[in-house]
Image: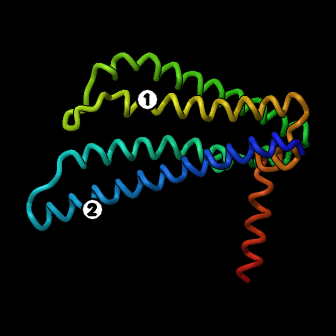
Amino acid sequence: MDPQDSLGQRWIQRGFRLLEAIMVALLAAMVAMVLGNVVLRYAFDSGIAISEEMSRYCFVWLTFIGAVVVYREHAHLGVDTLVRVLPKAGRKGCLALSDSLVLVCCAVFFWGTWKQHAINASNYAPISGLPMTLVYGIGYFTSVGIGIMVVLRLLRLFTGRLSDEELRIFAGDLQDERSAHTRQGIE
């Protein structure tokens, strides 16, 4: 293995760990803000208005950052019933078709975020006064993040560098093996 390649993989791994840490921080902030408001409303018949707004925005960011992390881990929902029974060439064809559709969706999502950017930049949150591009701008991150992973996988597929393991993960074969190993460990 090329030393530069492993260095690049380490940086990618660190980047995704940072994203996971951001997700944990967003979730912790949401819990603190919502719990704090519940306690304030129950005990003191008051609340902090900005915490309601910010917890909603944290939820939006948590969801879309999570989508990128989950895509990398191949954990999005998929219908693999047909793909499992196909031969290797059929699996590759389904992978190419599936990833091409995901890439189109990423492009549409990016384009939609771009088209809404001017509108969101001129709209401000009612309580915090933040421009709404800070909330809805996450569409750029998500569409580009998933889009890059899709393009790289398609490049590996078309250049013949897609591993059999990646193809088995796409077909859902490895999830069954993991489940079997988990069941054996429990029994």
- The mark found on residue 137 in the picture is 1
Residue 76 seen by the camera: no
Question: Residue 132: x, y in percent?
Answer: 33, 29
- The mark found on residue 35 in the picture is 2
Location of residue 119 by image quarter: top left
Q: Report the number of discs.
A: 2
Crowding around mark 1 (Cα neighbors within 10 Å: few <14, some 14 to 19, many 20+) is some
Q: Up-down: is 174 above or below 55? A: below
Q: 65 and 86: which one is in front?
A: 65
Residue projecting furthest to the bottom:
187
Q: Secondary structure at mark 1?
A: loop
Dividing the image into 4 quarters, which one contains the C terminus?
bottom right
The residue under the point 59% across, 29% down is 144
Residue type of the residue flagged with mark 2:
Leu
- The mark found on residue 104 in the picture is none
The residue under the point 48% across, 30% down is 139
Q: Closer to the N terminus: mark 2 or mark 1? A: 2
The residue under the point 27% across, 62% down is 35
Q: Secondary structure at mark 2?
A: helix
Left or right of 90? Residue 97 is: left
Left or right of 86? Residue 178 is: left
Gap between marks 2 and 1 measured at Cα: 27 Å
Question: Residue 41: x, y in percent?
Answer: 14, 60
Q: Up-down: is 89 above or below 122? A: below
Residue type of the residue flagged with mark 1:
Gly
Q: Are marks 2 and 1 in contact (CB under 8 Å)?
A: no
